[in-house]
Image: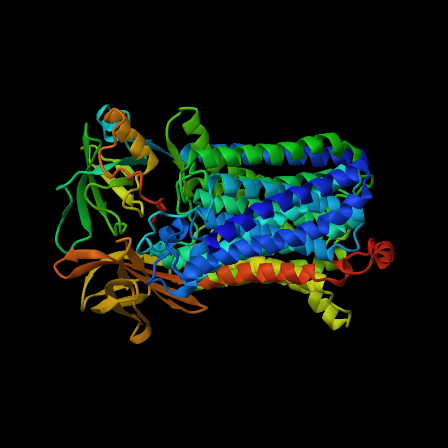
Amino acid sequence: MTPRRRRIVLVVGILAGVSLAGALALRAFQDNVMFFFDPSQIAAGEAPRGERFRLGGMVRPGTVDRKSGSLDLAFVVTDFKHDVRVKYTGVVPDLFRENQGVVAHGKLSPDGVFVADEILAKHDENYMPPEVARSLKDKHGGVMPVNPTPASAPLQSPLTTF
Amino acid sequence: MLPEIGHFALILALLLAVAQAFFGIAGPALGRDRWLAAVGPAVTAQFVMLTAAMGTLIASFITNDFSVAYVAQNSNSALPVVYRIAALWGAHEGSLVLWSWILVCWTLAVALLSRQLPARFAARVLGVLGLVSVGFLLFTLATSNPFERLFPAALDGRDLNPLLQDPALAAHPPMLYAGYVGFSVAFAFACAAMLEGKLDQTWARWTRPWTTVAWAFLSVGIALGSWWAYYELGWGGYWFWDPVENASFMPWLLGTALIHSLAVTEKRGLFKSWTLLLAILAFSLSLLGTFLVRSGVLVSVHSFAADPTRGIFILAFLVIMIGGALTLYAWRAPLLKSNAGFEFTSRESFLLFNNILLVVACATVFAGTMAPLISDALGLGTLSVGTQYFNPTFLLPTLPLIALAAVGIHASWKKGRISERRGALLTALGFSVLFAVAVVAGAYEGTKVLTPVGLALGAWLIISALIDPIDRLRRRITITPAIFGMALAHAALGLFVISLTMVESYTAERDVAMAVGDSAKVGAFEYRFLGLQPLEGPNYEGVRGEIAVFQGDRQVGLLHPEKRQYWVQGSVMTEAGIDMKLSRDIFAALGEDLGSGRWSVRAQVRPMINYVWIAAFLMALGGVIAACDRRYRVTAAARETALETGAGLPGRAG
């Protein structure tokens, strides 16, 4: 091969490799990105069936139901307009509790129950996942319903535990 | 009084940084050589001022001066002294001071060790570093003053976040910052070369050790963070592709590419403009990482505060620094032509592919990190990108990279022959495949498609990296630090690949509900819940479980997972119980009280996980050793001759 041809082969090879990688990355991206839905969107039927997504909202007080001594857990996530029942088996984060913002990963079952495989709660009393905060804000006309950060309080570190 | 002195020192440091930037950049540009003499003293004085600022802030922490708002927010009188010092970088304001201080340390090191550099060039390097320092000090003083007073003073502090009260995390930010900020030196060298309009092989030789050391710091910083996440977050994971982890990983990937392209620029005078671009981009990604973390755009373990003015300030700084550097690049890079050819299987080719693959890997991480932000900003919906995206797309470029490395480290410069080592390499490959097959055949369960691939590639890279040093040992040829460091770093990479493969393939994990006296099977191990006692620490209380782990009839570990409630912040913390051995970790974390006397327990057994971090440290060590090579320290005259005699030899370390 002449140096010129060799260089052409090299450039073509690199281009082919990079575009192949790009195409595969794009595919992986389309298949594996998770979208966020709130209970109202689920009630409106916007959430996909049989695909994993993120559900976010508040844990409705008085709905956390655990069979004593079992890892099975059921609770209701609400955005104060609509509710979604959630089922989960496993260890929940330290900050999972009633009246706290929560994000769950999982799928919607045919009977409308969200079966979660992962629960995230943020490690700060005053913290709310941003998408949850926004979703709740929309529903309440700009007023945050719970746990607003007091203006005078020193800034806190929102830390996740997942 | 002390905090005011610290504040004043910070302001003086800013003024000195302005002087350093002005004299360093304007002096050579206007041909005023007498101005150059001011640059060095400005650096030293700035170092003194920033050290004073750091010192006063540390003093405020140690003496529990809760009239300082930052101390009141991040410390407490019950906090152990070590963590009172570490609390300095526990939040936003203090970590900026730390950042500036580390920057001035790097600058001072450059000033002290650059005596044999041409005076104008050295002044330009220090000037660019001064410019970076101006940006950060301005940011600190304008938006995030750590010395602000609280009136009336707080009776006690709000305590350091319990997650951060940990030795590995106390060391994590300084290491990480040393790496981040260290890339500013390569950036400054690049800008100085572009300002001069001249870039030769000696330039690359000056830049290399700085870049390698910065890269080593960054490696250690990332490894410490990962280790901390593993044992402290209580979930047993070690890498989450969290946006902020990615923010530190992207500069690492580009830094790795930069180290390798600098080798080509030094040895062969090639890839000049590419090297410059990488130097600019690596530092840009460090700045972008700061922007992502500090602006509150991303929400993760690390985002301290969501403050829009801070975000906008950093964004403006980012645009000015990166935009300026890239403009300079567009204007000057065409001057820097490389005029030499190389053959297809020469070392240059391998390093070219190394660079392409690393940049592609960095690009996929970048895409996954930025996609949620972009989608959100454009109103396309809120999405999240997780492991399912990152794992496959990251492995795609990196698996071939490992194979290329195994072969490429034996390639000669310029000429395309590897034939003399071909036999050894093939034998090594044979042994590696055998090793992989043996492990997979002997495994209990959990083998995946990629398991043998990862094991074989890792083993091949280890053996391949050791061929050259062993050969030299046998033929009694000196092993220079450069050769030793390079072999160590690449062998460590092989070890890293093997341990990662083992962890990802053969981890056994289960969440179980257990009462005292219960036992549960996890892989080949049996967990027995022996008891639960109340617990009281210096600033927390809680419960402490006792879990014995058996393999067959033999007890192999006794774990003490804890659930802590910290008094001041009221936060509940999971402290995992881990039995660490080189061969495997046995892990248990207490979830919550499920009622009926049972607790949720997360149980994991991870083989070889400690090698993941050991390998990262060895990689960094290899880098440091290589950076100590004599040829980076020889005087200017000796350098010229060394360049003549050493450049064309095959097998010289790169």
Viewer can see residue B347: no
Name the residue located 44 percent from the left edge and 68 percent from the top edge: B583
Q: In this view, does B613 lie to the left or right of A32?
A: right
Q: In which quarter of the image is residue B549?
A: bottom left
Q: Residue furthest front?
A: B1
Q: Which of B183 and B435 is in front in this view?
A: B183
In the image, B553 versus B22, the foreground residue is B22
Q: Is B115 left, or right, of A157 in this rendering? A: right
Percent position of residue B604, x then y: 34, 60
Residue B163, x across and y down, in percent: 36, 55
In the image, taking residue B134 as reference, residue A135 lies left or right, namely: left
Residue B130: quadrant of the picture: top right
Residue B610's place in the image compared with B381, above or below, is: below
What colour scheme governs how the chains and residues are painted in the rendered image of this protein?
rainbow
Above/below status of B154 relative to B337: below
Image position, residue A121 (x, y; %): 29, 45
The N terminus of chain A, quarter of image: top right
Farthest residue to the bottom: give it.
Answer: B554
Foreground of the two, B265 or B649: B265
Q: Residue at x 20, y 36 (%)?
A: A113
Report the label total: 0
Residue B71: x and y in percent read 40, 53
- In this rendering, does residue B316 appear at all? yes
